[in-house]
Amino acid sequence: MQLSCLPVSFFSDIIEGRMRLGEWARMARELALDAVDLSILFIPDRSPAAVAAARRQIEDEGMRVLMLTTYPDFTHPDPAQRARELALARETMEVAEGLGARYVRVTAGQAHPGVSREEGIAWAVEGLTRLVETIGANGPIPVYENHAKPGAWQYTDFSQPPDIFLEIARCTAGVGLHINFDVGNAAAFADDPVALLSQVVDRVATVHASDTATRGALQHVLLGTGVTPYVPLFRRLRQAGWDGWICMEENARQGREGVAAAAACVRRAWAEACEGE
């Protein structure tokens, strides 16, 4: 297992310029993370020169970008907007490649009022499929998440309900789309998060480690202090032979100490899941 982190606790600081990407990379290195994750919101200037400069900030600290998280809205009811979302998603893939990122987290889209289950699934499958079809063999790998709601959106993710997530996953099984499995979202919205993981475990490329205070709603807390069953989930991954990247979605708002505590939690849970192998 290798460990990276999306610094949700520092989103405002990074977006508003109070923390440079190099500072985030330095903190991650000092905490012995293996890589860092970025949000596309951190890259307002997507010109090749600006992207290259962002990459240098991180690599100058001895770190690399593992994942770029993005927010395509493939379920928008306006077909013209869906076309724009696809074009934007392709642009973000180019940004990820410029950053040296191996993975790009992608989403189905928002639960726009009036969009039926059938429409939303069809539009999400179409958008995700068309995005994958444009990716070169050596380009970043898009990973579709059982997602909830980012601050950048007005509505929750259309595929937040596990049954819709599974249907979209099923319909994209043959196109080469991988999964970024978010354990906190699974704990919040699935009756049995381990059973949900089991249905897609053969497609899981990366794992988002987050935590929630309660089931039925996503209430971010420090990793390891909520209801997410880390050890059973990690054991299920190990049973499938998985030994990849765990990307912490750290949103405890406790600064450096929160990232350090989250990393310690994930490492303990992984070690316990591997006991007896």
Image (cartoon, rainbow, N blue to C red):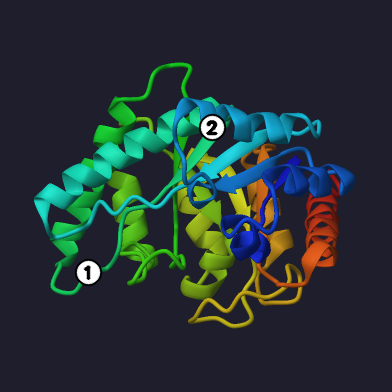
Amino acid at the residue labelled 1: His
* Residue at 79% from the left image edge and 47% from the top image edge: 28
**17 to 142, vertically: above or below:** below
Which mark, by number, is residue 146?
none
Query: Horizontal and vertical percent for residue 140?
Result: 49, 28
Query: Horizontal and vertical percent for residue 162?
Result: 39, 65
Which mark, by number, is residue 112?
1
- Left or right: 135 as drawn, with respect to 227: left
Residue 173 seen anywhere in this rendered image of the structure: no
**Which secondary structure lies at badge 1?**
loop
* Residue at 29% from the left image edge and 54% from the top image edge: 73
**Which secondary structure lies at badge 2?**
helix
Which mark, by number, is residue 51?
2
Query: Horizontal and vertical percent for residue 85?
Result: 26, 46
Q: Quadrant of residue 134?
A: top left
Residue 216 seen anywhere in this rendered image of the structure: yes
- Left or right: 169 as drawn, with respect to 98: left
Query: Horizontal and vertical percent for residue 168?
Result: 30, 51
Image quadrant occupied by the N terminus: top right
* Residue at 13% from the left image edge and 73% from the top image edge: 114
The numbered mark, 1 or 2, whose residue comes first in the sequence reads 2
Amino acid at the residue labelled 2: Val
Residues under labels 1 and 2: Cα distance?
A: 32 Å
Neighbor class of circle 2 (other Cα within 10 Å; few <14, some 14-19, many 20+) is many
Q: Nearer the viewer, residue 136 or 21?
A: 21
